[in-house]
Amino acid sequence: MSQMTLSLALFRRLLLGLCLALVSLSASAEPDRSPEQVIRDSIDELMSQVEGRKDHYANNIDELKALVDDNLDDIADFRYIGASVMGRYFQNATPQQRSRFVNVFRQTLIDTYTKGLVTFDYRELRVLDSQRASRHEDQASVAMEVVAMDGAVYPVSYTLRQTDGQWKVVNVIVNGINLGLTFRNQFDQAMREQGRDYDAVIANWSPEIAAEELEEGGNA
């Protein structure tokens, strides 16, 4: 397997980790918990869910998709994420187009990255003990690391926003790559290529990250 393929598999594995962590968060995102504690608890729950069940999930991918699908709405603010990805095009989109894009964006992530569950192993997921203080009371950033089997360490940072008393994930930075910004740039490019045809862009939306971009990282 090439290094590029390994990198792509890792990226999918990282995002799957995010999805499963969010599933775990749905049961623990209580208002009195700090963002760091919410993420830490979710990682512990994630490990207990995945350990020893790879064969089961490999043969029941739809079950995993349903699990993620049923629980993501409780913790990820997809309306906020969708608006952010659409960027400057959000204002001129119809309510129906906005809603449709949110649903498509959410489903493409689930469909694309859930499959990575059984294709890449990691050694450890760890939430860092030292976290940066937030500038705003309703916003927070939680840093963690994914340690690959070869010892390589990939930093992951969750951006959370407090909505109706709950902390919800609105963005993720993987190895220095800001996924929200990357997807926004992809949406902008698609709109320019499709002559600002919202319906065509939404119908053909497929989030992509180049494997070499993940390998080099956003700070390269």
Image: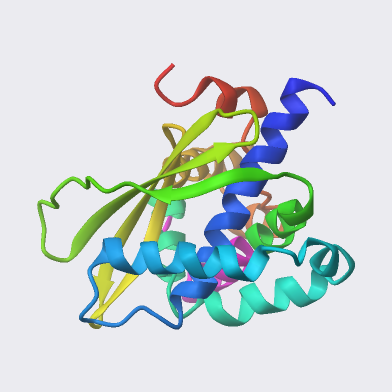
The answer to whether residue 92 of the structure is visible from this angle is: no
User: Residue 99 in magenta?
Assistant: yes
Give the image quarter of residue 105: bottom right
- Of 115 and 161, which appears nearest the observer? 115
Could you say where residue 192 lies in the image, as x and y percent from the top left? 56, 38
Q: Residue at x 73, y 61 (%)?
A: 111
Could you say where residue 62 lies in the image, as x and y percent from the top left? 81, 73
Quadrant of the image for the N terminus? top right
Q: Residue at x 73, y 72 (%)?
A: 64
Q: Residue at x 74, y 64 (%)?
A: 52
Toward the right, the furthest residue is 59
- Of 60 and 211, which appears nearest the observer? 60
Asked if residue 38 lies left or right of residue 81, the reply is left
Could you say where residue 23 lies in the image, as x and y percent from the top left? 54, 73
Q: Which residues are magenta?
A: 88-106
> How is this picture coloured?
rainbow
Asked if residue 66 lies left or right of residue 68, the reply is right
Residue 3 vertical position relative to residue 185 in the rendered view, above or below = above
Could you say where residue 45 lies in the image, as x and y percent from the top left? 51, 70
Q: Residue at x 83, y 70 (%)?
A: 56
Magenta span dominant secondary structure:
helix
- Of 96 and 70, which appears nearest the observer? 70
User: Residue 212 in magenta?
Assistant: no
- Of 59 and 169, which appears nearest the observer? 59
Question: What is the count of numbered marks?
Answer: 0
Residue 134 vertical position relative to residue 3 in the rendered view, above or below = below
Asked if residue 8 lies left or right of residue 171, the reply is right
Quadrant of the image for the C terminus? top left
The answer to whether residue 47 of the structure is visible from this angle is: yes
